[in-house]
Amino acid sequence: MMNFLNNRTVRIFTQAALLSALLSACGGNGTTSTTSDVVHPTPTEASRILSQGTFGPTAAEINRLSNMGTSAWFNDQFSKPQPTKSLHFTYMNQAQAALPAGQNLSEAQFLESFWQKAVKGDDQLRQRVAFALSEIFVISFQNTTLANNPRGVAEYYDMLGAFAFGNFRDLLEQVTLHPMMGNYLSSLRNQKTVGARLPDENYAREVMQLFTIGLRELNEDGTETNPPKATYTSDDIKGLAKVFTGWSWYGTDKTDTRFFGGTPDPNRDWRPMQNYPNFHETLPKTFLGVTIPANTSGEESLKIALDTLFNHPNVGPFIARRLIQRLVTSNPSPTYIGNVAKVFANNGQGVRGDMKAVIKAVLLDPEAMTFSTAPSAGKLREPVVRLANWMRAFNPQSTLATGQFPVGNLDDPLREIGQTPMSSPTVFNFFRPDYIPPNSSIAAANLVAPEMQITEETSVVGYLNYMHNAIPRGIGTSNVIQPDYATELALASTPDLLVDRINLLLMQNNMSAGLRTQILATINSNPNNTALNKVYLAIFLTMASPEYLVQK
């Protein structure tokens, strides 16, 4: 295989990408319009919606969205069921049955399923939103217990997808009762007050700080109230922690032995936790201005607690900002957050927490639909999304008879992309939503750039090295996942059209004249370049460019 780029070119693009990422802020453009709907989006507008609401545009899906119109496309995506055969959980069960006796499932089988469905699934909106939710309601394979229960993690991810288009209140309950979350944030086997022993406070703290209301009281537009005020106190954490006592493994009885993990049910890794009265707090539970009376059951206490959190005025703007950051832009304007928060509070039919309405509001707000060159505009594309963009754009096929996508752990920042789905190092995700790169123009502008927390010289070089190999050779074990460049090869003799196609698929037609000129000059600089090398160059130089790395 020819080396289609010389070392000097790679070095120049490496330096340029890093420099631009450090200097370019990633956020909103201050649009003040309200949520809109484009009846029949242009190819550029369709590509933009797909770049934010799916794992990446394809030529076919751009055409389909343009022809259907946005309302019909969203309705189509919302109506797609989550069939059993497409579940990660089903894939894991089938994989277990195919493994040799005595060999257990691992993270590897989940990743095979993840990439196959992220790239090939026709329910792309659900796939992309589930990934966004997995970076809000975080659990991780880096937890030893979860690493030993990969089927449970797969079902947790399926659960996020299943409730992505439902109501936020139901999603919150499913997250709370899932045994993988119970293990990850230690609410499973949490016990009532006995003597000096107090309930574990971990989940009580994180369900407020990270999943619902945040640290500071907010106005509907996401700005902090004046004067600033904390949303909860240490006493609120202590009171709420009592709610999450007595919850443990699913089973056919509620004996003390089963509570502590004995007599395990074969499905306890995924069935919702159940409450064991012997271990549930009998004392009153006071938090956020609510008091649950003494001797209230575990189930009723949970309902009151989750209703209280769900109805807190912070939840709309808090979740609005988190979803916008994961899908669209790092620094959304107050107007943008307010638009989405209003829809969270009322979908137009008096329903609070309607996720379909919220998702549509996030993706169709003028701030999401409008390309901006403002210094604050956009977000750094995280590595998983970049790789998925490439695979979606160029329709890779597995050469294995089984059709498997054996893409393993990609955490190595030097040789791989530095990020693996469901393997966050902490409950705060791979990057914190308020991360500010130190000593940068982003910091000087009082902006945030979450994805920059996993971006530095090593990871930029690693990403470029990985794509430099992936684009011509494919990816996965023994490079069995092969891209299809047939359409691009047909355009290689007319580089202008080749670059235009890649511009639409990867950059939503936002490539600057300068970058386009640079890529064309590189393609045409060697008269002996083969058609394949022209395709490789056009794709690599696009994906290496700062303009691609920062989604505007």
Image (cartoon, helix red, strand yellow):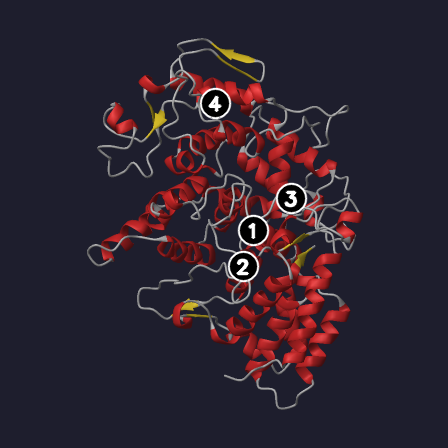
Label 3 sits on residue: 364
Which residue type does callout 3 highlight?
Leu
Q: Which residue is mark 1?
A: 68
Question: Is disc 4 placed on a helix, strand or loop?
Answer: helix
Residue at the location (54% across, 13% down)? 290
Q: Secondary structure at mark 1?
A: helix
Question: From the viewer's perspective, is residue 521 above or below residue 132?
Answer: below
User: Can you tell which of label 1 and label 4 is closer to the viewer?
Assistant: 4
Report if the CB atoms under discs 2 and 3 are less than 8 Å apart.
Answer: no
**Looking at the rendered structure, which numbered label has been put on residue 241?**
4
Residue 535: x percent and y percent?
58, 77
Q: Give the secondary structure at mark 2.
A: loop
The residue singled out by tag 2 in the image is: 418
Label 3 Cα neighbours within 10 Å, binned few <14 / some 14-19 / many ≥20: some
Q: Earlier in the sequence, mark 3 or mark 1?
A: 1
Instruction: Give the residue type that dot 1 points to.
Output: Met
Question: Pointer 2: residues within 10 angstroms few (<14), some, or many (20+)?
Answer: many
Whole-Å distance between the Cαs marked 4 and 2? 35 Å
Residue in the foreground of this view, choosing between 461 and 535: 461
Q: CA distance from mark 1 to mark 4?
A: 48 Å
Nearest to viewer (mark 2 / mark 1): 2
Q: Nearer the viewer, mark 3 or mark 4?
A: 4
User: In 3D space, how far apart are the residues under numbered discs 2 and 1 (Cα atoms)?
Assistant: 37 Å
Position of 523 compared to 295: left or right? right
